[in-house]
Amino acid sequence: MKSFLIFLLCFLTVSSAITENMKKVYKYLIDHGYTKEGAAGLIGNLKAESGVRPDILEKSKQSKLGMNSEEYIRRVNDGSYTNFVHDKAGFGLAQWTYYSRKQNLLDNCKGKIQDLYCQLDFLDSELKTYKTLYRLLTTSHNVAECAKKVMMSYERPANQSEENQNRRAQIATEIYKELISLYGGGDIDIDDEPTSDEPTSEDTTTETGRTYTVVKGDTLTKIAKRFGTTVKRLCELNNISDPNFIRIGQVLRID
């Protein structure tokens, strides 16, 4: 029974149901030059830290400060709470805690400390000062490597064990798989419903053979199965070097 509960806890910890915030953070990072793998590695750490929520005050500090997240945000924003910088309480996407980082966060997001995009701008500006890490996140195609490097170089939690590194790498890998499944490694639309100018699934036959227009949720694997071909063949026909990267609206040759 104990072994089962441990397994269940691990499963729930790794499970990474994609939230709207994850989609928004992923789109932001891709738009700002991060690789898909670098973005997933970073998001895996944000999930471990805050659940990828910008409006979270460290739970263990809420009773000590006598405030929940909502009241904390309100009082920081209206200026009635003046110890934000020095209270040693983790806050936001990355659970910023150290006083100089919280001061910079406050300076950048004054009056809207819980705003997702303000925190993302701050996160991006911070990461650019970690030159080796930033280079990795904008060039690497190794999710686990990115996740571990973010944890050890940027987040630096109290538990820096190899086990915890592997756990964050696993969380990031699951998130990566789900995001790639959602977006096919191509253009990202964070809305659940297609917009009016988004192409619908369509395959046509021309003099040079069948073609297919990529829609949201497609991957080369799905398309290959649909048409009874292989990913390798689709890559060859369409000069695709990265099988994880196709974009919505792209017209693919099928044969």
Image (tube, rainbow, N blue to C red):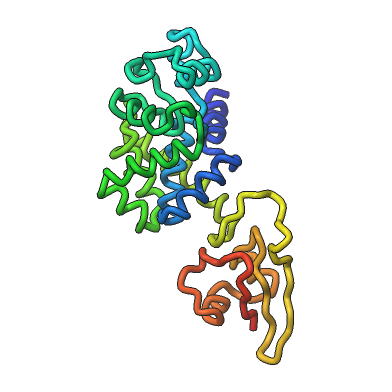
Q: Report the front residue among 180 and 79.
A: 79
Q: Residue 89 sits in which quadrant?
A: top left
- Give the percent coordinates (x, y) of residue 172: 46, 44
Query: How many marks are shown on the rendered structure?
Result: 0
Task: Report whether 233 appears left or right of 49.
Answer: right
In this rendering, is residue 247 above or below 13? below
Q: Which residue is drawn at 55% across and 45% down?
A: 24
Q: Residue 80 sits in which quadrant?
A: top left
Task: Report whether 249 appears left or right of 245.
Answer: right
Q: Report the front residue among 159 and 250.
A: 250
Task: Report whether 219 appears left or right of 148.
Answer: right
* Residue 93 in view in this figure: yes
Q: Which residue is drawn at 47% across and 55% down?
A: 31
- Rendered-image quadrant of the N terminus: top right
- Give the percent coordinates (x, y) of residue 124: 38, 44
Q: Which residue is drawn at 33% across and 30% down?
A: 104
- Rendered-image quadrant of the C terminus: bottom right
Q: Report the front residue among 209 and 57.
A: 57
Q: Which residue is drawn at 39% across and 55% down?
A: 142
Q: Residue 105 sits in which quadrant?
A: top left
- Give the percent coordinates (x, y) of residue 73: 50, 21
* Residue 159 in view in this figure: no
In this rendering, is residue 54 above or below 229? above
Task: Report whether 37 appears left or right of 247.
Answer: left
- Give the percent coordinates (x, y) of residue 184: 58, 60
In this rendering, is residue 199 above or below 59? below
